[in-house]
Image (cartoon, rainbow, N blue to C red):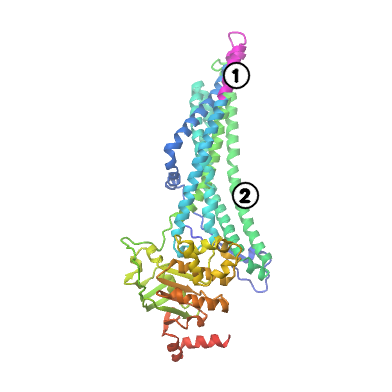
């Protein structure tokens, strides 16, 4: 499988040499192109999404398809009758009555063909949209289950493009492609039978070019499939960079890097255009191939057809009908070639979709996992070793204990392992060695959902969803009443500022809550956590970006929030953890000191040095 890492890095520059092109300064790391033969198992897997609708909706669609095809194939035969029997009969005068009857029949057939086409298009669109709905839903549900390790390796934009662009690219295949393929197959079969019945010698002579065309076209298949995979890959990179650019627009403008960012985007955009042009050019080769083959077939038709007329083996009317059938023969052949190209595009997208669907979560319930009952909050780390990357341990034999209701503060320099400990406690990652026990249960032996339901997390960068203030707080517990939501907000001193907003709790906030201050967003996150009523509370730099006045409010709210709960606090602002029951000082993944504030200050060790250094520069 291709591992997707949409990142860029600067090339080393030679001394005395100035680079002037953006493409010379940056290299890209993209998805790997999935280079393998056409996977029929994956093809069946893709079309299995049609099964729920096949029994009810496909039979009338197939019936309308056959009806439309039969009426279409009948028209050339009636034309031949009009020529041979009504316009220029060999054994009598012209018959206008017969001509009028045949003309009326042709009109009726065209009406029937039109009505069957309307019905067919209506139901195929319904089937196609339902299939796309199911596929997108399954993909979204699956990526919701994937572990942090999956998202660590992929930018958000590249994940988004799988759910949107790649799924959308399958829409034409399911709404039009499948049914059109059925129509073309029925039409081809009917034409072949009719041609052989009219004159088998002429029929075989015309169709002799088909195997030649097939052999030539097969040489293009692999190249076209890889070309469309490259198009999807380039589009994924554009979406990833676009997502990063929008989220980082403040940094871009603050450092006046707009021009550089535009140049970088132009390079990616140009690469995407080139890959699209290449794939499109390969697609267009099918059209001329069909035209050339059709021209050769038409040449054979008239040369041999005139000869058969001269020998009395064929009439002029039948030759005209034969010509119409041959024209109708190459038309579905051409559409099937385009359909194959469409299928290659769809398979390129489906390979990318199923690559995600086949990703197994690193964190999943093991067989026999049990529900974690309501816990007291006794937490033990026993000889815990963990590596994000093999050979680079983030934690080295961690042993720690938190009694029920205790507040534990994690202190240390950046990269010391503080956030890793809380990530492991929430089981966002699995440890390499050792045990993590909660009330005696190894967290790997309990169901993940039952574990995380009893853990509340407040992060430094609080995420606010688009919606109302009320909905954002209710995210902590979806069945909470309005009264419970307001009670939680009052407990953390968020009620007053909420009521000053234009519509109070019903005020709409934009994505990430940009209309709110950092302190206000943090207060909402505290209300959300309090509403969830977790047994274990994790505060990851939750007060790092809050002003002093707001911090006083939060310190008071924390007394309510932490009461009766085991808590882990990660903080660089050491003034916020003075009251912690136990302070654990980490350095390079190892515990160096353990104690409360007074004990550690008396030891004059690492913690004391951190406190003194922080207050020295305040």
Q: Are marks 1 and 2 in contact (CB under 8 Å)?
A: no
> Does 63 sit above or below residue 420?
above
Q: Position of residue 580 (x, y in %)?
A: 44, 81
- Magenta segment: 83-109
Q: Looking at this rendering, what residue extends furthest in the top direction?
A: 92
Residue at the location (53% across, 66% down)?
Answer: 463
Q: Is residue 343 positioned above or below 513 on the image?
A: above
Give above or below for 407 relative to 71. below
According to the image, label 2 marks what residue?
A: 277
Q: Nearer the viewer, mark 1 or mark 2?
A: 1
| Residue in the picture at 45% in, 52% down | 138
* Secondary element type, mark 1: helix
Could you say whether the residue bearing mark 2 is in a helix, strand or loop? helix
Q: Position of residue 218 (x, y in %)?
A: 51, 42
Q: Looking at the image, can residue 182 be seen?
A: yes
Q: Quadrant of residue 115?
A: top right
Query: Majority secondary structure of the magenta segment?
Result: helix
Q: Residue at label 1?
A: 103
The quadrant the C terminus occupies is bottom right
């Amino acid at each position: 499988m291709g591992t997707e890492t949409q990142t860029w890095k600067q090339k080393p520059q030679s001394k005395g040499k100035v680079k002037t092109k953006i493409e010379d300064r940056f290299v890209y790391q993209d998805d790997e192109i999935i280079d393998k033969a056409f996977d029929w198992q994956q093809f069946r897997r893709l079309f299995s999404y049609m099964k729920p609708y096949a029994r009810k909706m496909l039979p009338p669609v197939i019936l309308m398809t056959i009806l439309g095809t039969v009426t279409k194939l009948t028209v050339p035969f009636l034309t031949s009758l009009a020529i041979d029997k009504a316009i220029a009969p060999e054994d009598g005068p012209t018959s206008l009555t017969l001509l009028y009857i045949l003309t009326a029949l042709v009109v009726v057939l065209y009406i029937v063909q039109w009505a069957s086409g309307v019905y067919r298009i209506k139901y195929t669109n319904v089937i196609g949209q339902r299939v796309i709905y199911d596929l997108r839903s399954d993909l979204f549900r699956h990526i919701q289950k994937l572990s942090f390790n999956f998202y660590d390796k992929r930018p958000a934009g590249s994940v988004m493009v799988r759910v949107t662009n790649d799924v959308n690219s399958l829409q034409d295949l399911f709404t039009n492609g499948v049914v059109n393929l059925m129509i073309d197959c029925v039409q081809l079969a009917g034409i072949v039978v009719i041609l052989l019945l009219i004159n088998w010698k002429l029929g075989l002579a015309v169709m002799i070019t088909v195997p030649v065309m097939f052999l030539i076209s097969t040489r293009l298949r692999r190249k076209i499939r890889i070309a469309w995979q490259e198009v999807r890959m380039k589009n994924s990179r554009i979406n990833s960079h676009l997502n990063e650019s929008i989220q980082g627009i403040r940094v871009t403008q603050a450092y006046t890097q707009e021009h550089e960012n535009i140049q970088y985007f132009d390079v990616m955009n140009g690469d995407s255009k080139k890959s699209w042009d290449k794939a499109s050019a390969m697609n267009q080769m099918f059209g001329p191939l069909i035209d050339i083959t059709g021209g050769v077939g038409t040449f054979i038709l008239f040369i041999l057809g005139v000869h058969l007329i001269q020998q009395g083996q064929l009439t002029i009317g039948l030759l005209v009908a034969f010509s119409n059938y041959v024209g109708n023969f190459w038309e579905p052949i051409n559409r099937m070639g385009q359909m194959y190209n469409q299928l290659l595009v769809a398979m390129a997208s489906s390979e990318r979709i199923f690559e995600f669907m086949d990703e197994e979560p690193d964190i999943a319930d093991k067989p026999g996992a049990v529900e974690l009952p309501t816990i007291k909050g006794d937490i033990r780390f026993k000889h815990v070793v963990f590596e994000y990357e093999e050979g680079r341990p983030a934690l080295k034999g961690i042993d720690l204990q938190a009694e029920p209701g205790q507040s534990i503060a994690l202190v240390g320099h950046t990269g010391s392992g503080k956030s890793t400990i809380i990530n492991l406690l929430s089981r966002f990652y699995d440890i390499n060695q050792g045990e993590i026990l909660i009330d005696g249960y190894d967290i790997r032996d309990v169901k993940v959902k039952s574990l995380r339901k009893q853990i509340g997390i407040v992060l430094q960068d609080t995420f606010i969803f688009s919606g109302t203030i009320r909905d954002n707080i209710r995210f902590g517990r979806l069945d909470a009443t309005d009264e419970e939501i307001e009670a939680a907000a009052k407990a953390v001193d968020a009620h007053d500022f909420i009521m000053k907003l234009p519509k109070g709790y019903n005020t709409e906030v934009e994505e990430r809550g940009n209309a709110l201050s950092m302190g206000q967003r943090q207060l909402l996150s505290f209300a959300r956590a309090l509403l969830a009523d977790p047994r274990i509370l994790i505060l990851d730099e939750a007060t790092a970006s809050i002003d002093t006045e707001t911090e006083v409010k939060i310190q008071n709210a924390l007394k309510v929030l932490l009461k009766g709960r085991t808590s882990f606090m990660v903080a660089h602002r050491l003034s916020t953890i003075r009251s912690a029951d136990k302070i654990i000082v980490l350095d390079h993944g190892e515990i160096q000191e353990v104690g409360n504030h007074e004990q550690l200050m008396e030891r004059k060790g690492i913690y004391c040095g951190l406190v003194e250094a922080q207050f020295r520069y305040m």
